[in-house]
Image: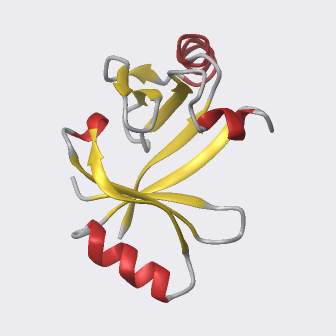
Amino acid sequence: MHVDHVAIAVRSIDSAAERLRHLTGYMATTAKVTNSRQKVNVQFLGKPGSIPIKLIEPSADDSPLWGSLRKGEGLHHLCFNVADVDEACQTLVTGGARLLAPPEPGEAFDDHAIAFLYLGLGLNVELIDT
């Protein structure tokens, strides 16, 4: 299990991407993609020698992301790349993590399995197997 990217919840990907470009030099590495299952838009930003940042914004009025954004924009989750999402979920849940969203195809990851868990310590994680 290793860190794949950091996700930041924002109200506007376009505004956030421009701010991060200006302040940190991170540039868009993908187009904005809509994940209809999770009701969010996502865009990846990158910078040579640094971990990718994924910006996520609600794509609908009933997006679950609005709950997080009521507290303000900011860190939403760390994403870990794992060999097997189902197996990693089971291991983490057995260890005390809480499953938030079971494995399902992730549109931003060419329909590879993704899952979300809460590890405690205020930390949400996403698991991917890409």
Task: Please identify the residue farthest to the right as the structure is shown.
Answer: 71
**With 67 as the anchor, is 63 left or right in this view?**
left
Asked if residue 119 is positioned above or below residue 12 in the image, the reply reads: below
Q: Is residue 12 above or below residue 50?
A: above
Residue at the spot x=60%, y=19% of the render? 16
Can you say which quadrant of the picture contains the N terminus? Answer: bottom left
Name the residue rendered at 37%, 80% in the picture: 90
Which residue is nearer to you in this view: 47 or 59?
59
Of the pair 52 and 127, the residue shown nearer to us: 127
117 up-or-down from 89: above or below: above
Q: How many marks?
A: 0
Q: Position of residue 66 (x, y in %)?
A: 67, 32
Residue shown at the point (52%, 54%) measured from the top left: 78
The residue lying toward the viewer, choosing from 97 and 79, is 97
Task: Where is residue 47? Give x, y as percent.
Answer: 41, 31
| Color encoding of the figure | secondary structure
* Left or right: 42, with 113 as reference point: right
Place of residue 39 in the rendered image (x, y in percent of width and height, measured from the top left): 46, 31
- Residue 23 drawn at (x, y percent): 64, 20
Occupied quadrant, residue 35 = top left
Looking at this view, name the residue that lies furthest to the front.
Answer: 62
